[in-house]
Image (tube, grey):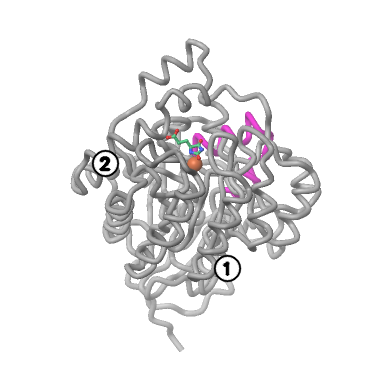
């Protein structure tokens, strides 16, 4: 019986990023991939492929086929820029001191509050297109530069509009607990109360976010405040994740694990016993080497301890105006290897399979697998490891999202 499908790509080398079913760390196989109605319907050898009648029948000519890339941690909606602080950092000022002097996040809060939804959308689109051209088909975008009801909702509506473009899947996260806003009475506990009692119920009513995030840090919020925030988010049916152990040990990772959170992000100061906690609760560690690089940090995440404990490691840009103005997920993947020591195969898992898990999308994205979303890329290279190795050289020769070919000029 002939199977009618929307498309098939034949004569390809596939890096499926499936685990345990094909010969190597990339889940490599020689063969073809077919898709229909936005889903992958066949992945395997030509010999095993059923007889198909395909709308699109593409000869890959031995190019590599990979899953679409997933950037699972960005702050790409904001206005203004922080290049002046970049100079201060280069002159030896610490990020913490700039923030304490009223700069840092609050500097971007002022600019973002002054910007219209349309201005925010247009500037965000310029940054998003840099990621799409590299083959990003799923992106997580956080609020966190509004820090008032109208401005946080404004940011989250812009994030929703970016998801309505149709060429990328957007996961929206509320990061109102980014810092204490400069105009909020100086009482951090009262601000957390406002988030839990006023903001979260409103954004839940408007279905504006799937997850809640926090900056759990000496210059951010405490583990106890994080616990109160996560308890309220969980009661509302929202998932949780956290910026934790970035600049110091605050035990934020312990709170993420306690609530069965999606991910613990940054984790430079994670301790071995916390690695075991994350592994036990299937919490993904999201590595953000762009911030480590820009802040000239010296403390690296405990990669080997996370390997030993079985923690899934994802890699993301942390694209934000202050600590990581990095508009390239492939550069973040290269940095995760060069600066943190991931193998190219681990970096590939970090921008596909593990990044999907960090967004609660492990059952539908991040692998070339039957039943998964038809998000895939064609690459003209000798091996996917080259794409991690050579900075700013490779772009996909073909990008499909939900089985529809994308053009990002
Ligand atoms: N950690 C970071 O590195 C960013 N946010 C956070 O919680 C910094 C964001 C900024 O400086 O604008
Ligand atoms: Fe971040």
Using the numbered discs, state the Cα–Cα distance from disc 2 to disc 1 in whole angstroms. Answer: 51 Å
Query: Where on the picture, by quarter, is residue 375?
Result: bottom left
Residue identifier under label 1:
44
Image quadrant for the C terminus?
A: top left
Left or right: where 386 falls relative to 171: right
Q: Nearer the viewer, residue 177 or 242?
A: 177
Q: Position of residue 343 (x, y in %)?
A: 68, 40
Q: Is mark 1 within 8 Å of ligand 2?
A: no
Residue 406 visible in the snapshot: no
Residue identifier under label 2:
113
Residue 347, magenta (yes or no)? yes
Residue at 48%, 10% (x, y): give it.
91
Q: Position of residue 244 (x, y in %)?
A: 61, 44
The span shown in magenta is: 330-350
Given contact means CB atoms under 8 Å apart, are the residues at marks 2 and 1 in contact?
A: no
Looking at the image, residue 63 lies above or below residue 360: above
Q: Is mark 2 within 8 Å of ligand 1?
A: no
Q: Earlier in the sequence, mark 2 or mark 1?
A: 1
Q: Nearer the viewer, residue 39 or 298?
A: 298
Residue at 46%, 60% (x, y): give it.
196
């Amino acid at each position: 019986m002939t199977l009618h499908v929307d498309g098939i790509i034949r004569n390809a080398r596939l890096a499926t990023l499936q685990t345990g079913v094909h010969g190597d760390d990339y889940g490599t196989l020689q063969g073809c991939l077919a898709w229909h109605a936005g889903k992958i319907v066949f992945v395997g050898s030509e010999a095993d492929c059923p007889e198909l009648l395909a709308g699109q029948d593409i000869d890959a000519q031995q190019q590599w086929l990979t899953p679409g890339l997933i950037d699972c941690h960005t702050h790409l909606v904001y206005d203004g820029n922080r290049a002046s602080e970049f100079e201060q950092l280069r002159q030896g000022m610490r990020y913490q001191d700039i923030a304490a002097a009223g700069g840092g996040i609050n500097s971007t809060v002022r600019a973002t509050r002054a910007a219209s939804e349309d201005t925010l959308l247009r500037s965000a689109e310029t940054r998003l297109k840099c990621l799409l051209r590299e083959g990003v088909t799923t992106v997580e975008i956080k609020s966190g530069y509004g820090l008032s009801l109208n401005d946080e909702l404004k940011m989250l509506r812009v994030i929703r509009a970016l998801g309505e473009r149709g060429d990328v899947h957007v996961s929206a996260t509320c990061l109102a607990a980014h810092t204490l806003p400069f105009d909020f009475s100086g009482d951090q506990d009262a601000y957390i109360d406002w988030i839990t009692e006023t903001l979260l119920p409103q954004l839940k009513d408007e279905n504006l976010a799937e997850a809640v995030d926090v900056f759990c840090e000496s210059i951010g919020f405490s583990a106890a405040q994080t616990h109160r925030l996560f308890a309220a988010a969980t009661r509302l049916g929202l998932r949780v994740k956290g910026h934790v152990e970035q600049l110091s040990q605050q035990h934020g990772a312990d709170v993420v694990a306690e609530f069965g959170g999606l991910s613990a992000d940054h984790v430079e100061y994670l301790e071995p016993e916390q690695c075991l906690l994350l592994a036990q609760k299937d919490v993904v560690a999201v590595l953000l080497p762009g911030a480590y690089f820009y802040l000239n940090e010296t403390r690296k995440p405990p990669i080997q301890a996370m390997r030993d404990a079985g923690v899934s490691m994802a890699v993301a840009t942390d694209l934000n105006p202050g600590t990581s103005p990095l508009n390239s997920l492939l550069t973040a993947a290269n940095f995760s290897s060069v600066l943190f020591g991931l193998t190219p195969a681990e970096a590939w898992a970090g921008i596909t399979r593990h990044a999907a898990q960090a967004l609660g999308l492990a059952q539908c994205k991040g692998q070339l697998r039957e039943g998964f979303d038809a998000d895939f890329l064609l690459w003209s290279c000798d091996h996917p490891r080259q794409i991690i190795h050579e900075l700013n050289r490779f772009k996909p020769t073909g990008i499909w999202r939900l089985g529809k070919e994308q053009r990002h000029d």
